[in-house]
Amino acid sequence: MLLLLLLITAARSSFADHYYVPSGSMENTLFAGDRVVVDKTAYGWRIPYTRIDLVEGARPQAGEVAVFDSPADGVLLIKRIVATGGQVVSLRDGHLYVDGVALAAVGVKSREIFGEHVAELNLADGGGPLIDRLVVPQGKLLAIGDHRGNSLDARYWGLIDERELYGRAVAVYFRKGDGFVWKPL
C-alpha cells in the first residue's frame, strides 16, 4: 500500500496534476473555482520533487497558460505566457502588441489571438499597468492574467525564467455551476 502511494505521488509530481484556480485574474478564460488539468511533462520531465530535468521538453510558447511559483512570494500561480525571449511587448489599455503587431481579434476587442491559442479577456476593470516596448531576454517569459485590470502578474513582479514553469494547463475539467466539463485551453 505504501509503495502504491509513493508511485501515485511520484506520478502526480512528474507527469500530470490538477490546479484549483483561486481568483478571477484569468477571467474570462478561467474563473475562480475552476479545476484545471496540468501537463507536467510539457516543458520536460523532472525527477520528482526537484527541478532536475531528465528529458528536455518543448519551449514555452506565447499564448499557453502555465503554472509556476510567483517570484514575489512563492505562491503557485496560473497565468498566460504572452511573450517569450526576443520578443518586444507593449500593453496599452489592456491590449497587447507583440513585435509591433496588435493581438486583438478583428472586430472583437475582448479577444486576443496567439496563433492557435485564444485569450478571452476581461477588461471590465480597465487594462491595468501599461508596458512600453519591453524586450524580453532569452530564457525569460512575460506572464500576465487575462483579467488585465485585476491581475497581480509580471507587471508587478517581473519576468520569470523558463525553467520555473511546473507545467502547461491543458483544459478546465470542472467549473463551478457547470460541473464536469472539458474546455481545452
Image (spheres, grey):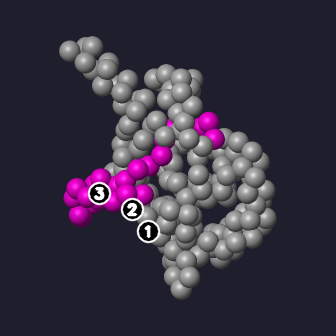
| For residue 2, side relative to residue 104 (left or right) | left
Q: Residue at x 52, y 54 (%)?
A: 64
Question: For the residue marked with disc 2, what is the amino acid?
Answer: Phe
Q: CA distance from mark 1 to mark 2?
A: 7 Å
Residue 146 location, x and y as percent? 52, 65
| Residue that protrudes farthest toward the bottom in the picture | 107
- Number of labels in the image equals 3
Residue 176 part of the magenta segment: yes
Q: Residues within 10 Å of mark 1 (few under 14, many from 20)?
A: some
Q: Answer whether labels 3 and 1 touch (C-beta < 8 Å).
A: no
Q: Residue at x 36, y 43 (%)?
A: 18
**Where are the magenta residues, as a range?**
162-185
Asked if one can make out residue 94 in the rendered structure from this viewpoint, the answer is no
Which residue carries the number 3 mark? Answer: 182
Residue 73 location, x and y as percent? 59, 41
Disc 1 secondary structure class: loop
Q: Residue 28 — which label?
A: 1
